[in-house]
Amino acid sequence: MRAVFCFVPTDFRAPEALAVMNTPSASPSKPTSPRTGSLSVPLNFRKEMACVTALLLLHLAICVHAAVSETVTHDEIWHLPVGMRNLSEGRFDVERLNPPLTRMWAAIPVVLRGVQADPQTSGQDLGRKFVLDHPQDFSKWYFLGRCSNLLWSLGTAILVYLWSRRLFGAPAALIPLLFYVTCPNLAAYSSVVTPDAGGMFGFVATLLACLWWCDRPTWPRAILWGIALGISQGLKFTCLLLYPLTVFMVIIQLWGRRNDFRGSWKTTIGQGMTALCLSFPILWGCYGFQKIGLPLEQWVFQSDDLLTIQKLFSFVGWLPVPFPADYLLGVDEQRHIMTEAHPVFLDGRWSLSGFRNYFIMGLLYKLPHLFQLFCLLAAVQFVLGKLRPRPWKEGLTLLLPVVLIITVANGEKVQLGVRYVLPVLPLLMIFSGYALPAFRAWRPPVQQAGLIVLFLCSLMSLRDLPGHLGYFNEWAGGPRGGRSHLLDSNLDWGQDLGHLQQWMKKQGIDRIGLAYFGTIPPQVLGINYELPPSWQPRPGLYAVSVNFVMGRPHGITQGDGTSRAVDFQEFSYFRFFEPVKNWGGSIDLYEITTADVDAWNRAMQQQE
């Protein structure tokens, strides 16, 4: 683990500390500037690395356990085979809704095993075709892809620790890392083959690289910033926000040091422009340097956003666009989908245009209370100016991306889960370190005991292992109560079908009524089933996905393998009955008797 940190320069610390070090009177043998949240617990480098290694291994174990336990989820069914075709064929028009880098990365171990995806199928249909073509071993290929993908999360955990150590020193930096490792949401979305964990890594890595360059602008650091910015664009379209964010970050950081800045402003501006420009060839490389520089007037867009931009700059329509065609068409397709009407659920209400507070409430329901408490204490410390010196520049670097991402996401019509704002979680975890000065007055033995209690309390958020995806905190009512607040990938993403199959096998049940919200055909798991009756109950044994219980419309696979649409509230009558069992918060089991049906009929008559 010492090797992991060997690339971290000795001057990777706050600019105030660097300023002191660079003065002639500074003594290298004395600490230059006390870090904001340093604790007085003694911890040498070897013990520090042992703690970091243990936490990283814990995160790895949690994610691997989830990866091997959960059924292939709703979206990842097509991400893996699309990445396989991207990697093996060099084609990026197979499915453009997401950049290819995370999907290709996840596909590497599968492609190396010689597995192939159907070259004649494109788009999201490719996932279903891949599963049907590999009915015996598809789970193994998705597990390999999941293990590859979770390395993005492991890398983000390291960045969280490095950034926290830069601000607060050791051992205080272990606390944000602990929050990261024990966050069920991060474990859930890191152990599936989707671009979310990769996009989170790209966001944090780019911000940290930019901040490092701001500390001491040099050409190597500018190049590192540009590489990180370019790679992030190949990970997730959300990372487009990094262009304005990093520019604003540079303005904040350098303007605050304009009076004591010793470098050349001309050189510094040149380095910044080089970093921004360097990101484009890095992005081109992610798309195999294909279809670059098409004139603006030749593009055919479908989203209002890009059509507006095209019309606004029509007077220079001959200018080449510095984005790969498949990348920009993917952005266009994504923007078109995000502005369409879509059923969104929040706190018992449905909307086709989304909610302005959706992701704020989502974070209130889905994050562990202990972490929320530390964020609140950090905000109080920060706003009231209890920190000396007040680290407003560092705080803005962390909070501005959080505010921007949540604001943009809340303005969209498609709001399907906190995974859409996943990059804000590691940033908030770093920010939570600002709560630590409140504990500096404690004696070292008390601080040590407090760290042990904090570690044990953090583990309580993992109580639903491996059902991390359906995690809700106590205020939201846990996984069973979460359905009253949020649905979709917050709770039910099709992850528990395998648990139902194992239960049926153990109980000797040959056939069941099943309404499954997911893209894996239940037949490939050997489940013999028929759909429950529509609109009104009938005696029998039924397993129903919570999304359908709460009334969500969606497509569904029928018992004969064909598909059809499920109407809004078609299976909502199941809410009248009490489930006898639940898996992961996402699938209810109902044993409906004739007496239950009679009770439902009487209740309906009374409502009339």
Image (cartoon, rainbow, N blue to C red):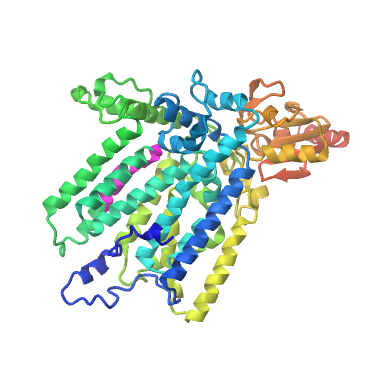
Residue 170: x and y, percent? 41, 69
Placement of 456 over or under 83, stated as above or below: below
Residue 548: x and y, percent? 66, 34
Placement of 392 over or under 82, stated as above or below: below
Image point 63% across, 49% down: which residue?
466
Quarter of the figure with the C terminus: top right
Q: Is residue 243 magenta?
A: yes
Query: Can residue 377 be seen here?
Result: no
The secondary structure making up most of the magenta span is helix
Taking depth in this image into account, of 165 and 242 the one nearest to the observer is: 165
Left or right? Give the position of 282 relative to 592. Answer: left
Residue 560: x and y, percent? 71, 20
Residue extending farthest to the right is 595
Image point 41% across, 33% down: which residue?
100
Placement of 445 over or under 600, stated as above or below: below
Residue extending farthest to the front is 113
Taking depth in this image into account, of 119 and 258 the one nearest to the observer is: 119
Query: Can residue 443 be seen here?
Result: yes
Taking depth in this image into account, of 282 and 468 the one nearest to the observer is: 282
Q: Is residue 94 magenta?
A: no
Residue bounds of the magenta highlight: 235-249
Residue 556: x and y, percent? 64, 26
Image point 38% across, 59% down: which residue?
5
Taking depth in this image into account, of 461 and 209 the one nearest to the observer is: 209
Quarter of the figure with the N terminus: bottom left
